[in-house]
Structures are given as C-alpha cells and as structure tokens.
Image: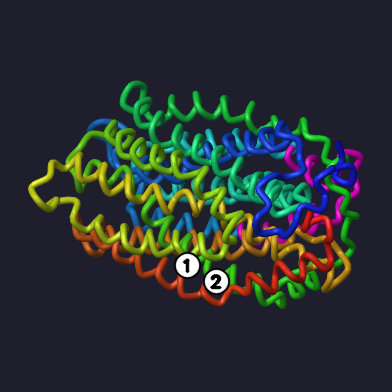
Amino acid sequence: MGRDEDPTAADGPVVGRTRGLLPRWVVLAYGTGAVGWVLVDRILLTWLFYFYITAPAEGGEPLMLPLVFGGVMFAGRVVDALADPVIARLSDNHRGRRGRRLPFLLVSAVPYVAVFIALFHPPMVGRSPVNALYLGVGLALYFTLFTAYVGPYLALLADLSGTTADRVDLSTSKAVATLVGAAVALIVSGLLVEAVGVVAMVWMLGLIAVVLLLVPLRIPERRFAHAEPATMPLVEAVRTTLTNRPFVVVLIGANALWFGFNIISLNVPLYATSLLGLSEGAVAVLMGALFGVCLVAFPVVNRISKRVGLKRVMIASLVGFAVVFPLIALFPTPPFGLPHLAFGVIVMAIAGIPLAGFFIVPDAIIAAVADLELERSGQRREGMYFGVNGLTLKINLGISTLVSGALLQFAGDPVGLQLTGPVSAVAVAIGALVFLRYPEADVEAARAAVRPDATA
C-alpha cells in the first residue's frame, strides 16, 4: 500500500501519531544495514587504539605512542571529513535506475570491510614510522569508504519517511541495529579477543558484517522515495545548508555530545583493565549492562519521542550523560566499598538510559530540519545535511581522539583515564544548553506546510 493509499492519512498532528506508513519489512531491512557498519566501526574505535598502543604480542614493543596514534587518527578524520560533502552532493544529485542512495551502498560495502581488516595487519613489528604512515593512509581510505556507505544510508532515512512516525520508526530500527552491532562489537569481540586474539576476531566479525551491509539493497528505493535528484553545485549546497538556523543549532549540540561520547567509548577497554583491574573479557560484562538497559529503554524512548517531541528527549539524554560520566573518576576506588566489577556495572547500567535517546533522536532531528530545504531552495538535499553533519562530526571525533591520547600520555595512568569522565561530562552539558535553542515547534510547522503528508 503506497502513502497516498493509506486509510489513516488524516489522523491528526505530527506529534502524537504512533503508526507510520512504511511496511514493517522496509523498516527492518533498513535497520539491518546499521548492524553491519556499526559492528565494523565500533570494533575499529574500540580495539584499534588498544591494538596499536599496547604490545600486539606478549613481550613485544607497542606499535606507537598514544599521542602519535591520536595525531594519525586526527589526520585520517580530516581527510574523511572532506569526503562527506562531496559524497553527499554526489548522492543528492545522482540519477540512477535504483535511486539516489542504494548505488552508493552497493559499491562501498565490500571495500569498506576489506580496508577495516587490513588496518589490523601493520607491515612492521614494533614501533616504526612505516606503521604510522600505513595507519594514516589506511584510516583515510577506511573513513572515506565509511562515508560512501553511511552518508547515503542516513539520507535514505529522510527520503523514506513521510511522517514523523515513519522517521521515528526508522530511527528506532537503526537504533536497535546500532545496539546489536555495538553489543557484538563490545561484548562478543571482548570474548573473542580473549579466546582467539584481536586479529582473528576482526576477520570473523568483518565477514559477518559484509552480509549485513548488503541487506538494505532489498528496499525498492524508487517506490517509497519520490524525491527528484538535486542540481545544486557543491559549494552552494554546503553554504545553503549552513544558513539553515535550526540545523546549525542541531549541528553544534550534536557535536558537543559526540565529543564527550567518543572519549568515553574509546577508552572502555582501558577502563576495564587499567582502572577497574579486570580482564579484557570484563568489557563484555560492562557493555552487557549498558546495552541491556538501553534495549529495555528503546520502546519507551520511541513512544515518548512521538508524544512529546524530539527536543525534550534529546536534552534529557544529554543531561543524563553529564550526570553519569563523572562517575568514571571513581572507578579505581568505588564508593561504599563496592567491588570494582559491581560498581562498573552500576555506572554502565545507568548510562544505558540516556544512551537509548542518543541512539534514536539525533538522526531523526537532522531528517526533520533537512525537510525545510524544500521550502528554502525547492530541492530535496537530505544527503548534504547528513554530509555537513558528518564533516563536522569527523573532525570532532579526530579532535576528541587527540584529546584522549593527550590525557593518557601527559596526565599519566590512572589520572588521565579518570579525567576522561569529567571532561566528557562538560562537553555533553554544553550540548544540552545548545539544544535548548532548537526551535522544534517552528520546524514542525514549516515541515507541515511544505510536506502535507508529514501530518498524516
């Protein structure tokens, strides 16, 4: 049944509607792709840092110093960031038999995973400038291929969603998939590393990811997404996107959140081993607590987001992280005489509540403000909105990785690790203050004027 055939097409306002118009299988197929890229990306962000700054074999010399790794990662992120608007423009303007987005998913999926696996095969044993060069080039390729898949994938969310309910459902499907991918990356990977080592784990999970990345290709994009390809040149497209005031507010707030969250997620294995004195396998227990609570919270966040709007849920998530992150500073000496593992599990479980909002809300908000472009320029350019967001986000992630490496190298162990919690809390608190200025009511009113089916 198409959108214009839906019998509930006049069911009331955007906020309050709980059922979308897309078939359930489309929502599920869309989410499955996220399992693949989140699985790969989380493994890379969790274990690559650990792999390169610790001895790759017992008695071996670490491949590089933490600050050197942070610098190389930052350089890779800069190259990656420059690819975002270019790929976004190509995707928005693409005219193909299968649509604007799916061709990019098709050509990037396999090379993306191949480069991911290659990053865990440095050419030299021990510390060497060759390894730094190899890592830098490899990361530039990896992140560019990541963008070639994920940029059009995220833009597809906006293309497919005709109502707020569809947008929240697609975001929730992606969020559940993100949780599954991250859980496997952080829980299963920890167990596999303990059993077979980092490199074998990367091969095993990388091959599974390839299959998952190809599932969204089953979606008939042209049937559900009716937008005409855009024609705006690259520089003008970027400039016009950055003049959308609600988008700029979202951009600043979301980047503050990602700055803090990336520092925390980057150091999870070190929290377990260095601060809590546990084994690598304990990462699975900590992540199990985090994702278990998050999974339970997903249906609640989905429903609340449709009822009260995305802004309030986003601010609540940011405030929640700002409260929880400083507790990491207490890891070496848990309060009330709690065992180290028990305290770690409690902190991670509490963090699972705001994490549910973090997984669902940001992409749905970007999809909402991207809809305003039709009124502003007469063109549908969802890809560029996610592309500009990706450009700033990846530079941000590079800087936050550099900050993390500097904290570890200059503050020492365990002080540097303890400081990551308060530093991250300050960043997400800034994000919460920025999101107070997001004009949600104005955005939804403007969307209803240019896209009447969004009120269906």
119, 105: nearer the viewer: 105
Tell me where residue 157 appears, x and y as whole percent: 71, 48
Residue that carries the numbered disc 1 in the rendered image: 256
Q: Is residue 106 above or below residue 309?
A: above
Q: Which residue is more in the foreground, 84 or 215?
A: 215
Image point (45%, 46%), residue name: 45
Q: Amino acid at mark 1?
A: Ala
Amino acid type, mark 2: Ile
Q: Residue at x 47, y 67 (%)?
A: 256
Residue occupied by mark 2 = 252
For this orientation, the residue located farthest to the top is 195
Q: Nearer the viewer, residue 132 or 372?
A: 372
Query: Disc 2 versus disc 1: distance between alpha carbons?
Result: 6 Å
Colour basis: rainbow
- The reply to whether callout 2 and callout 1 are in contact (CB within 8 Å) is yes
Which residue is more in the foreground, 155 or 75? 155
Residue 427: quadrant of the picture? bottom left
As helix, strand or loop, the secondary structure at mark 2 comes to helix
The residue lying at 33 percent from left, 33 percent from top is 284
Extent of the magenta region: 80-105
Q: Going by the image, does 185 lie left or right of 231?
A: left
